[in-house]
Amino acid sequence: MFQSINHFWIKKLSVTLTAVFFQLLFTVPASALVFSNIETAADLQDALNTAANNGEDDIIELSENTVYSTADNGNSFTYIAQEDMSLLIRGASGAVILATDGSTFGLVVDTTNIASDENTHIGLEEGIQFSCDTLVPLDTSGASLLVEEAAVSVLNNSFEGCGVGVITTRLPGEAPTNYSGNYFLRNGIGAFVNGGKEINVTNNIFELNGPSSQDIFSGGGLFLVFPIEEEPIGIEVEVSHNDFLGNIVDFALNASSEGGNLLVDSNIMSGASREDLPNTGILANLNGQRAVFVNNLIVDHFADEFPFIPEDSHVAAGATIGVIGAEIILTNNTIANNQVEGGNLFTKGGLSIQDLSSDDATDPSSVELNNNIIYGNVSPGPGQDIFLGDNFPVGDTTGFPAVLRNNNFTNFASHCQDDPECTPDITEANNQDADPLFIDAANGDYHLSEGSPSISMADPALSETPSDDLEGTVRKPLPDQGALETLAMDDGGDDGADDGMDTGNDGVFLEGSGCTLNSSSSTFYGLFSLVTLIFALGLRLRKK
């Protein structure tokens, strides 16, 4: 077993504690007025109307095995706040909010009509099932939350079959938005946040999101957008311990707002269960942020080609990161077996990092690749595993500074290295090109087998080297490359002993996904249709 029993339960405990932390953080006061016995659609709308203007913090408790249909309500369920008070809608087993018969949203919460909502907490918690009858983006949403300074928590719910599962739009605001413990299945876009400063997306499952369309940018799992601010506030974003399985785009981020920090930590992103349409792992545009990607497993994304992308966009099947003046660090990730079989020489397989600045002065401050396994990726052009677009636009005379240390990869290319008029600024040290010997990559097991050349080949002194791995296994003093750590020795059998090297795995396997679950770029033109979709969605909500 590659994750020891003790570490397995430590990981499970950490997930539970995270959920408890956010529940405590967003708890409605004990003195809140409680609405119970909500048996019909009319009861729910009446409770929302009363809660909007009763001078109390409110809790609405849905009833077990009850479907609240917008068809029965005559429209979307709506809460239009008239006061700066909190609202918690708490689910129950079998409690469903259903958007159907042309309703745009299942639930609408709007706190922007009052002078200030800075004391407001909006919570959707504990097992609400949001369901819709169409998954075309912009057509329906399970829940739409329109706020300014109100804190938002969406915890332990499910969203299925909607254009957008849940969307939070800030106009603007800096209060935290938290999505944790939710399941997003077969939506056009699973979860979406437009604006704000502090975003936490943790311990969710995003599965098979993205409409049945040939437009790769028309949907996917998690989309975060930060519009340009008159005074940049500096975003603080964490996306961690999520499972992204078979989405058209697993995770998309567009940060037009300048500055701040991004942490993408211990996520699984697998395209193995999505063979009907082209799919990709990460599409991110960053603007002056410090962005850290650590312990992520990004594997098995596939496309014959990427439709509707300009031919000169260096988009990758695994991860595409466009940067303006940002600091990018990727440490101990496994990016493997992502492939593009058609397309053109500009399409990439594993990782593409693209300079989007207009001149040398706004080039990325630094790019570091440390202790990663970026291997077995396939694409038509050079840089199948790693591509650096380090002199965009063509004509830059100096490439951005990049350091590659203690990685395992085969095919690396730099735009600047191929341009005789550009001077590259690339440092390489202690990298290798050797088959990492995954246990069973064909069936989604990307643990390292005994004898792997990536074992104990990471440098713990490099930037952002984690103390544990994707599954919570504590790393050795001389750790392994990639997202998954092996332990020091094998006792020879699958007997439950805490040695970390027996056959089998304490992690959870999703049937048919080809991926172990957690225990819990292109240029701006290349992302144009995605960004247009997102901002169109935000503008539409502002008009509601």
Image (spheres, rainbow, N blue to C red):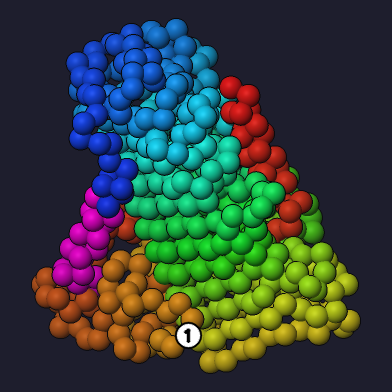
Does residue 422 appear to the left or right of 481 in the view shown?
right
The image quadrant where one finds the N terminus is bottom left
Residue name at image x 40 percent, y 46 percent? 178
| Residue 520 point in image, percent of width and height | 28, 54
Residue name at image x 27 percent, y 73 percent? 473
| Residue 105 point in image, percent of width and height | 48, 22
Residue denoted by label 1: 462
Q: How many marks?
A: 1
Residue name at image x 12 percent, y 71 percent? 496
Q: Main secondary structure of the magenta part?
A: helix
Check the image and report above or below for 96 versus 382.
above
* Residues in magenta, as a range: 1-20
Whether 126 is among the magenta residues is no
| Residue 97 point in image, percent of width and height | 36, 22
Does residue 45 appear to the left or right of 34 in the view shown?
right
Please name the amino acid that badge 1 sits on.
Leu
Residue name at image x 82 percent, y 64 percent? 358
Q: 171 or 544, which is in the foreground?
A: 171
